[in-house]
């Protein structure tokens, strides 16, 4: 009598559940194809904007979220902040076409567990999905525990040109939802008075938020702030018109 050999294939309950968040169908399809080849990964949902990602993740509780930055409604950094604040057990991997070292710092400060440009090698991304699903962080190819990430971030901040200057402690902090609203208005060329009228707040409140935005982005004026956000995909070009 033959005995059954236990199946090596993981059932869905054992697999790492992944959500893909990107507004480009072809990119989502490419990611899905690459990840579905791995027997331990399950693409359980997709979203096309940051707000949808937050809502779907609250319902389905994926283990790992692959998050674009340049998204409508809520950008990827805003969505990452909301997700990681609400769900400590969900890891977010930020994928971006707007890649630079400052973007990586913003992503990690927003709560991301890993950060990659969109041309990342698929196997490197798969490795990061597995590591972050276990509570690890992936930074510049290194797999780190949370205390190590905190130490790495501190070291990065200490090496920045603005280290030790007034307002340095605010640098790279995530922008609030209101600050993002104001920054979007700035990219459209609106004055403080126009922003105040549109958002139903006082001009002084707009000025206070503007001061906070400049500190967090470590820039000198509103034009630099607008360019900073557009270059990193925080605000979509069509939203700035």
Image (cartoon, grey):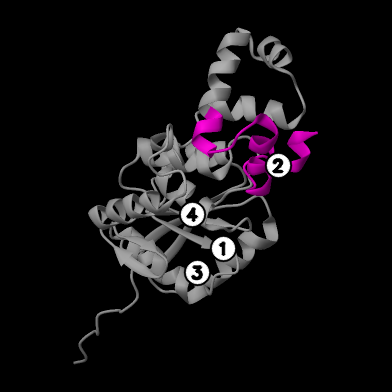
Residue 224 falls within the magenta-colored stretch? yes
- Say which of marks 1 and 4 sits in front: 4
Q: Are marks 1 and 2 in contact (CB under 8 Å)?
A: no
Q: Which residue is mark 3?
A: 35
Which disc is residue 104 wearing? 4
Which secondary structure, mark 2? loop
Which disc is residue 117 wearing? 1
Mark 2 or mark 4, which has the lower sequence index? Answer: 4
Examine the rendering and report whether any part of residue 145 can be seen.
yes
Which secondary structure, mark 1? strand
Which secondary structure, mark 3? helix
Magenta-drawn segment:
213-241
The C terminus: image quadrant? top right
Distance of mark 1 from mark 3, alpha carbons?
A: 17 Å
Mark 1 or mark 3, which has the lower sequence index? Answer: 3
User: For residue 60, which quarter of the picture?
Assistant: top left
Q: Position of residue 15 (x, y in %)?
A: 35, 64
- Say which of marks 3 and 2 sits in front: 2
Distance of mark 1 from mark 2, alpha carbons?
A: 18 Å
Distance of mark 4 from mark 3, alpha carbons?
A: 23 Å
The vertical placement of 227 against 46, above or below, is above
Q: Which residue is mark 2?
A: 236
Q: Are marks 4 and 3 in contact (CB under 8 Å)?
A: no
């Amino acid at each position: 009598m033959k005995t059954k050999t236990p199946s090596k294939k993981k059932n869905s309950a054992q697999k790492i559940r992944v959500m893909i968040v990107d507004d480009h169908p072809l990119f989502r399809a490419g990611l899905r194809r690459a990840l579905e080849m791995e027997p331990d990964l399950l693409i359980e949902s997709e979203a096309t904007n940051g707000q949808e990602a937050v809502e779907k993740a609250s319902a389905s509780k994926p283990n790992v979220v692959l998050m674009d930055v340049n998204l409508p409604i809520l950008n990827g950094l805003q969505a990452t902040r909301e997700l990681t604040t609400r769900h400590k057990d969900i890891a977010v991997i930020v994928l971006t076409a707007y890649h630079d070292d400052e973007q990586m710092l913003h992503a990690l400060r927003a709560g991301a567990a890993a950060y990659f440009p969109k041309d990342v090698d698929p196997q490197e991304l798969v490795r990061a999905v597995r590591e972050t699903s276990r509570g690890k962080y992936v930074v510049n190819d290194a797999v780190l525990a949370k205390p190590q990430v905190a130490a790495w971030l501190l070291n990065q901040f200490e090496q920045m040109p603005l280290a030790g200057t007034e307002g340095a402690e605010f640098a790279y902090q995530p922008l609030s939802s209101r600050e993002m609203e104001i920054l979007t208005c700035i990219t459209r060329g609106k004055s403080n008075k126009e922003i105040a009228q549109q958002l139903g707040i006082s001009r002084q409140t707009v000025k206070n938020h503007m001061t906070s935005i400049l500190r967090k982005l470590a820039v000198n004026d509103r034009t630099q702030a607008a360019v900073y956000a557009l270059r990193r995909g925080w605000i979509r070009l069509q939203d700035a018109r």
